[in-house]
Image (cartoon, rainbow, N blue to C red):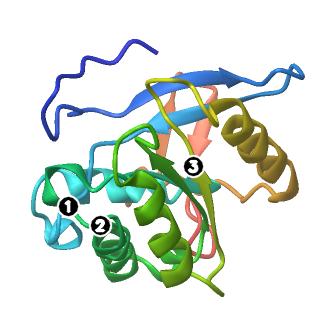
Amino acid sequence: ASPKIAAYHFTTLNPNLGVVKTIDGRSFIAADLPGLIEGASEGLGLGDKFLRHIERNKILLHVIDISGSEDRDPIDDYYAINVELRKFSEKLANKKQIIAANKLDLPGAEENLEKLKKALKGKDVEIMPISAVTGKGIKELFNRVSTLLDTIPEEEAVVVVGRREEVLDNEWKIRRENEVY
């Protein structure tokens, strides 16, 4: 993927899809979505436009600035995101989650990583320390995501197109049966 990014918040305006390949030859598609802000579940920012699409993902990978740069608290950031996920959909809130604790190369990151581990002890979330700049932990993260993806069953795709029967290209017919299209 070749997303357009800049050195300031919320430069991702549209989802970016990319293929991730692991060292052992496995691959998966990753979706980079715009960051969520408080109130996204109620329509603030770009969040509500993308929360629907996140439900189709098998795993949620949170990239969190573990260094606490810009006076942000990584623990607060994690909880704020999860509040928005839960407000939007219980299904979304219950998806498998991995935290990519990024910026491990910066001062304060190791201390904040330990605080995050302590705060989330006993919760069903994995924490994987990484540094996007140095590449540390990236291969391990991709391998872990690929392994987890193999263990999560496929969900039935349900596509809602409209309230009436439609014919597409004279080959496809979409109809409603038992609340499923």
Depth check: give the residue in front, 134 or 1. Answer: 134
Direction from residue 4 to residue 17 in the image, left or right: right
Q: Position of residue 179 (x, y in %)?
A: 55, 74
Can you say whether 130 is above or below 11 in the image? below
Displayed quadrant of residue 47: bottom left
Can you say whether 116 is above or below 133 in the image? below
Characterize the local packing of mark 3: few (<14), some (14-19) or many (20 or more) Cα atoms within 10 angstroms.
many
Mark 3 vs 2, N-terminal side: 2
Is residue 164 visible to the viewer in this orientation of the structure? no
- Can you tell which mark lies on residue 77? 2
Q: Position of residue 14 (x, y in %)?
A: 27, 32
Characterize the local packing of mark 1: few (<14), some (14-19) or many (20 or more) Cα atoms within 10 angstroms.
few
Can you say whether 19 is above or below 165 in the image? above
Gap in angstroms between the C-alphas marked 1 and 3: 17 Å
| Mark 2–mark 1 CB contact (< 8 Å) | yes
Q: Position of residue 98 (x, y in %)?
A: 59, 59
Name the residue rendered at 33%, 18% in the picture.
Answer: 3
- Can you tell which mark lies on residue 129? 3
Q: Secondary structure at mark 1?
A: loop
User: Is label 3 or label 2 in front?
Assistant: 3
Mark 1 vs 3, N-terminal side: 1
Direction from residue 150 to residue 17 in the image, left or right: left
Report the number of discs. 3
Depth check: give the residue in front, 83 or 103. Answer: 103
Displayed quadrant of residue 87: bottom left
Gap in angstroms between the C-alphas marked 3 and 2: 16 Å
Q: In the image, what residue type sits under mark 3? A: Pro
Direction from residue 124 to residue 167 in the image, left or right: left
Q: In the image, what residue type sits under mark 2? A: Asp
- Can you tell which mark lies on residue 72? 1
User: Is label 2 or label 1 in front?
Assistant: 1
Q: In the image, what residue type sits under mark 1? A: Arg
